[in-house]
Amino acid sequence: GQNIDQPTEMTATEGAIVQINCTYQTSGFNGLFWYQQHAGEAPTFLSYNVLDGLEEKGRFSSFLSRSKGYSYLLLKELQMKDSASYLCAVRRKTGANNLFFGTGTRLTVIP
Amino acid sequence: EAGVAQSPRYKIIEKRQSVAFWCNPISGHATLYWYQQILGQGPKLLIQFQNNGVVDDSQLPKDRFSAERLKGVDSTLKIQPAKLEDSAVYLCASSILQETQYFGPGTRLLVL
């Protein structure tokens, strides 16, 4: 089976930096995805890591350590519109290559 | 480029009734997924199609849920009969083979 852990809620201040952690346990790891989901909306793709290291995309960066089963999403220069849930999802190297999602971290950005 | 389309956006039914959801994936995306997202949880995969064939339906409650993708493009997901615990958002996603998945706006189902 697989297990994904993320903090349930986080609060951060506008303009600050926040790091959202995700730990996972799975067999046949084949990549980790981060999605952003605003309340009442569909998840939107943010980043993908399959090798160890940091992937940077504008204000968002994602890090992966496969040996530790650990990833984080780093959001810089927080804006109010960044208030959303952030979903960590692991893809397994099965025939179907399906994604397994964590329960998500609800981030609230305050002025 | 048009995104994943779903309809209806909202549906309210009584338990034991039946309901159907429709999804039109991004043009050219061979793989289509249906997810169930219960409030406060992450999406859970129900079924995955590649073209018109089922790749994975291991988490689909087959006694009441069914899905089809007859021509390898649009798909429908049906629940018959619905239970209270089926209240959730049903998300459709598509991808080019098993690459990044792009989600539709979802159908919010309430079973009373």
Image (tube, grey):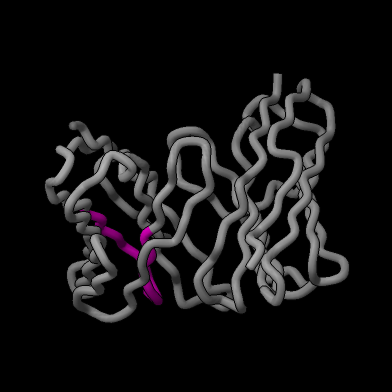
Q: Quadrant of the C terminus of chain A?
A: top left
Residue B109 location in percent, x, y? 67, 32
Q: Main secondary structure of the magenta part?
A: strand
Question: Residue A16 magenta-drawn?
Answer: no
B106 or B87: nearer the viewer: B106
Identify the residue shown where x is 64% and y is 54%.
B92
Q: Point out the residue furthest to the left here.
A: A16
Residue B52 location in percent, x, y? 80, 72
- Does the rendering let one see residue B63? no
- Does the rendering let one see residue B80? yes
Residue A76 location in percent, x, y? 18, 55
Identify the residue shown where x is 62% and y is 53%.
B104
A98 or A111: nearer the viewer: A111
A74 or A23: nearer the viewer: A74
Query: In the picture provided, is B33 more to the left or to the right than A11?
Result: right
Identify the residue shown where x is 71% and y is 68%.
B49
Query: In the picture provided, is B21 more to the left or to the right than A79?
Result: right
Residue numbers of the magenta segment? A21-34
Identify the residue shown where x is 79% and y is 58%.
B75
Q: Quadrant of residue A91 in the image?
A: bottom left
Residue A42 location in percent, x, y? 53, 48
